[in-house]
């Protein structure tokens, strides 16, 4: 509901602007930016997403190794359960429980670390994008630039300035672009 409300507010603002500017003999110049496409389209965004993917791959492999170790322990327990004395059974059960807790904590920590890294990437790029959009709007005489979302059923391609924002971003931050290209060459 909240996003629909924001969308309707944007539409009302656009209509209001049209009435105000039409009274002055001007047609408002508006644009739309697909923020997700900007994230995936900039060199810095690609680099950040590749690093996140590498982190998740490493964490997944470590999780699978820990899970395999736990499964092996559980299998050994099931196989030797009848031949072990009470002390050995209790010790093995305790070890299995500790491994289960360790595995759960590892998964939770990995997810929290991934979320923190993802937020860091998004916040770093988001701040830069906001500044670039404001500058781009002023330099190109836009009255308003809106973020694209699922509520806009159709936006004319001529109003989409996403590619221009990506181009300006990559020109403004060439160091990130070079760093993003380096791992691809390996």
Image (cartoon, rainbow, N blue to C red):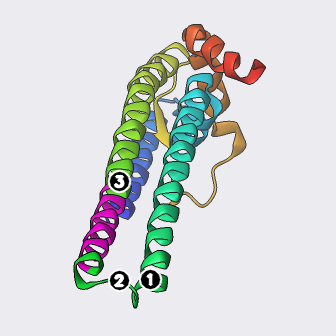
Label drawn at residue 80: 1
Seen from this angle, which residue lies furthest bottom? 82
Neighbourhood count class around disc 2 (C-alpha, 10 Å): few under 14, some 14–19, many 20 upward? few
Name the secondary structure under disc 3.
helix
Indicate which disc, 3 or 1, sits on the residue closer to the N terminus: 1
Query: Against 70, is 136 above or below?
Result: above
- Residue 73 image offset from top left, x and y in percent: 44, 70
Which residue lies at the image location 56% right of the left edge and 15% below the top edge?
176
Query: Against 88, is 121 above or below?
Result: above
For marks 3 and 2, give the CA distance.
30 Å
Which residue lies at the image location 64% right of the left edge and 32% below the top edge?
41
- Residue 43 image offset from top left, x and y in percent: 62, 23
Q: How many marks?
A: 3
Residue 103 visible in the shown view: yes
In depth, the one of 43 and 75 nearer the eye is: 75
109 with respect to 83 (left or right): left
- Residue 65 image offset from top left, x and y in percent: 52, 55
Extent of the magenta region: 90-105
What residue is disc 3 on?
Answer: 106
7 with respect to 30 (left or right): left
For marks 3 and 1, give the CA distance.
28 Å
Indicate which disc, 3 or 2, sits on the residue closer to the N terminus: 2
184 with respect to 142 (left or right): right
Neighbourhood count class around disc 1 (C-alpha, 10 Å): few under 14, some 14–19, many 20 upward? few
Which residue lies at the image location 61% right of the left edge and 14% below the top edge?
179
Residue 101 falls inside the magenta stretch? yes
Q: Are the residues at dot 1 and dot 2 in contact (C-beta closer than 8 Å)?
A: yes
Name the secondary structure under disc 2.
loop
What residue is disc 2 on?
Answer: 84
In front of the other: label 3 or label 2? 2
Query: Against 172, is 102 above or below?
Result: below
């Amino acid at each position: 509901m909240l996003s629909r409300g924001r969308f309707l507010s944007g539409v009302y603002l656009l209509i209001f602007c049209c009435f105000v500017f039409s009274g002055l003999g001007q047609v408002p110049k508006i644009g739309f930016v697909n923020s997700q496409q900007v994230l995936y389209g900039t060199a810095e965004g690609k680099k950040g997403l590749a690093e996140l993917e590498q982190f998740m791959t490493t964490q997944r492999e470590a999780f699978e190794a820990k899970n395999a170790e736990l499964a092996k322990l559980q299998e050994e327990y099931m196989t030797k359960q009848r031949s072990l004395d009470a002390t050995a059974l209790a010790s093995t059960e305790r070890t299995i429980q500790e491994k289960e807790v360790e595995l759960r904590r590892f998964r939770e920590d990995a997810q929290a670390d991934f979320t923190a890294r993802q937020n860091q990437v998004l916040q770093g790029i988001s701040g830069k994008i906001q500044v670039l959009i404001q500058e781009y709007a002023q330099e190109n005489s836009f009255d308003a630039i809106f973020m694209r979302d699922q509520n806009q059923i159709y936006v004319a391609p001529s109003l989409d300035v996403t590619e221009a924002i990506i181009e300006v971003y990559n020109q403004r931050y060439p160091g990130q672009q070079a760093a993003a290209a380096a791992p691809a060459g390996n």
